[in-house]
Amino acid sequence: MNADPTAGLAGFLADEFGAPVRVGGVEFLSAGARRRNVAFTAEIEGAGERRLVATIVPPAVEILTVDAEAAVRELVRAHGVPVPEVVAVCGDSARVGEPFVISEYVDGETVPRKVLRLIAAAGNAEAVARQWGEAMGRLHTVDPAEAPSAVPAAGADPAASTLVEAEEGVRTLLGERPVFAMALRWLERRRPNPPSRTSLLHTDFRNGNIIIGADGLRAVLDWEGAQRCGDPMRDVAWPALRMWRFHEDAREFGGFADRATFVRGYESAGGSFDLDRFRWWKVMGTLAWGVGLASQAAAHLEGTVRDIVMAASGRRVSEIEWDLLMQIRPDAKA
């Protein structure tokens, strides 16, 4: 990404709007190791000011093209999922150094620990949990066939194909760690049949990828991992993993919500909760995240992606081992 994307954004938007545009108020927002979000004000000649956000995606880490991701976002927004409106898409790296999507700015908090403090101060945990569940329920009622063909499909048996990928990841990166081998055996013995209904999935619908305000859930972010024809319980289980609770372990969903409240919201919007499948995907998600952490550390060590966030990932693999043991022990609660 160019150090200062102002000129590139202004030139692109001038072409999009057919009028001169002045870009100011640039603010580099918090972000993960892969994508960068830049908030700015676009002053459009004859049309006033708009507060916007450019999500800039390095091609090296692009999962979906920016066009496909934008199309998914607009599709689910039309079905009532709260998503920032897409303003424009640019696949040309010449503008700011990398492809990007420009969206309407949605005010609120995204940093997980700050989200927890905001919710505690507002006293709206139950409302946010219900809204969060409702948003996921609406997503899972979208016909996967409506999604762009560029969005990958989970296949006829999502659990089976995911298990194959997990086995390969463990064998390659974690072959000498017996807890992962034990968890794989647990998953193999309990692998569910293909779901009766598949859904369009987000795959990372957790605390950290949602915008929260004092009035509740405002938007769902980061749709680059969208998947067609997946098991909806994969999406439901993922935000319940301990690493997304941010030290508030007693509250299963995001560190602020209990499962019952989330599920009530989910089912009220058309979702169908399955406890056994949920538990399987929760163990699978935990194991997959352990593989992902090991992969991030390896990428840093190999020089593929040199980043301190990636480097620090390896030390958390032992935490995942503890989580797996707690989830698969004989007396574990679902």
Image (tube, rainbow, N blue to C red):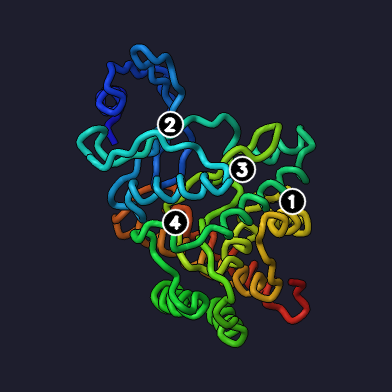
Q: Tell which tag, 2 or 3, sits nearer the viewer.
A: 2
Quarter of the image for the N terminus: give it.
top left
Residue at the top extreme of this rendering = 46
Q: CA distance from mark 1 to mark 2?
A: 29 Å
Which residue is under mark 1?
Answer: 257
Which residue is under mark 3?
Answer: 112
Amino acid type, mark 4? Gly
Mark nearer the N terminus (2 vs 4): 2
Amino acid type, mark 3? Pro
Q: Tell which tag, 3 or 1, sits nearer the viewer.
A: 1
Where's residue 150, x and y in %?
34, 59
Quick one: SS at disc 3? helix
Badge 1 density bin: few <14, some 14–19, many ≥20, Cα 10 Å: many
Mark nearer the N terminus (4 vs 3): 3
Where's residue 137, x and y in %?
63, 56
Badge 2 density bin: few <14, some 14–19, many ≥20, Cα 10 Å: many
Q: Is residue 66 above or below residue 94?
A: below
